[in-house]
Amino acid sequence: MSSPLNIAMIGSGFMGRAHSQAWASANRFFELPRRARMRTVVGRDLAGARLFSERWGWADFTSDLKCALEDDAIELIDIVTPNHLHAPQAIAALQAGKHVACEKPLAGTLEEARAMRDAAKAARSRKRLGDQRSFVWFNYRRCPAVALAHQLVKKKKLGRIYHIRAQYLQDWGQSETPLSWRFQGNLAGSGAHGDLNAHIIDLARFITGDEIIEVSGAIEKTFIEQRPSARPRAREAASGSGGRRVPAKKIGRSTVDDCVLFLARFKMGAVASFEATRLATGNLNRNQIEINGEHGAIKFDFERMNELQWWDNALDGQLRGWSTISCTLPGVHPYMDAYWPPGHAIGYEHTFISQAADIIRALAGRKPVVPLPDFEDAYQTQRVLEAAIVSARQGRAVRMSEIK
């Protein structure tokens, strides 16, 4: 094994926990050419960064990004901050000669995503660290069932593809949900659209190997326009309460979409529908896609992430029907060699572990199990996000050639 891969991570929230678990576990599950070393976590404040580093296994902590960028031992910067920070942090890291892995969506706006794409291209041409690389955490590609679907399409098992039907349905964004950064357009860029549609656009592009050429029929809707503040202010209680100060809900305005739906055409002739919402009551994290082809079809639902539904049109009519593939067989299904015996399911965190392993492989000059998205790849998904918003707001079909 060559020298360790020293990593700095920017951010210490929900995604920071998922990424920390991935870097800590990748070498435990996978036989890899380099060992991930969790060197530094960068947090908003020093006290919080210290607590996070102690709990999640980072060797050092700081609240100053420059410390990580100027540390010559650090090769990879992992960005897990809110969307509006992706561009300045990623560009600074690339200019400092680091490899960069960034959470999705690539950026809050198309302009920022383009700047990140261009910075990654410039970094690769400079070759200050050899072949400087960029990666984006579209982690659902690493579900064994999704990776298998990609392989089946590549082997022409579905034949010509007719329909792609993708939905990402959640219900956590009800009216009582506090006004976090995810509901503020200047920080998130968009709501369910960038957060959820980004994933299913990437899934459709990844599984089919095809590209969207037109977006139409888009609808953008904000149902909950006012939300309680995440930090209620105090106010004097009503008379008769003894003068106690009780929390009062401060109301703020949500400036992002709650849902976006749109239709699309693919280059090779397939038609598609996409839907993302945070108000699909009864759906916790239903990231699902169905692809119908000439010879077969597949269905995937993340709420049953270890399964792929398969339809084989070549079967005799008496036997033809949806079958369930339990994608848990080592030596048969992607990534499962590294985990448990057949039928022993894996979970959400394993998608990040598998991506961390593939990033380490790529940085050692090895092939990932399935393709890794870079900034150029994620920029193409960002273009589709932009086209859908243009379609919704202008009420027309948008050719992807319009979105530069």
Image: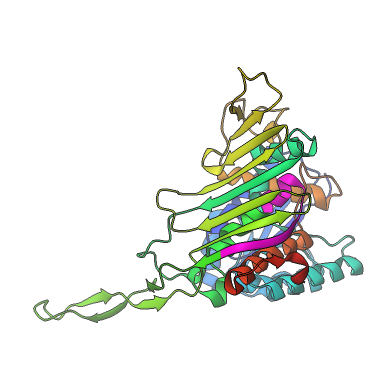
Residue 214 belongs to magenta span: yes
Q: Please indicate whether residue 331 sits to the left or right of residue 216 in the image.
A: right
Vertical placement of residue 153 versus 385, above or below: above
Whether residue 35 is visible to the viewer of this picture, yes or no, is no
- The colour mode here is rainbow
Q: Please indicate whether residue 8 sits to the left or right of residue 300 in the image.
A: right
Residue at the spot x=79%, y=47% of the render?
361
Residue range of the region highlighted in magenta in the rendering: 202-218
Q: How far from the left and from the top, in percent, is residue 157?
A: 75, 32
The outermost residue toward the left is 240
State the quadrant of the C terminus. Answer: bottom right
Give the camera-side residue of 185 and 238. Answer: 185
Tell me where residue 30 sits by quadrant. Answer: top right
Q: Please indicate whether residue 288 sits to the left or right of residue 130 in the image.
A: left
Residue at the spot x=60%, y=38% of the render?
299
Whether residue 217 is visible to the viewer of this picture, yes or no, is yes
Give the camera-side residue of 78 and 75. Answer: 78
Residue 353 belongs to magenta span: no
Q: How many badges with numbers are in the image?
A: 0
Tell me where residue 38 sits by quadrant. Answer: bottom right
Give the camera-side residue of 7 and 328. Answer: 328
Q: How far from the left and from the top, in percent, is residue 10?
A: 63, 66
Give the camera-side residue of 403 and 74. Answer: 403
Q: How far from the left and from the top, in percent, is residue 178?
A: 39, 68
Vertical placement of residue 26 versus 213, above or below: above
Q: How far from the left and from the top, in percent, is residue 257?
A: 51, 68
State the quadrant of the N terminus. Answer: top right
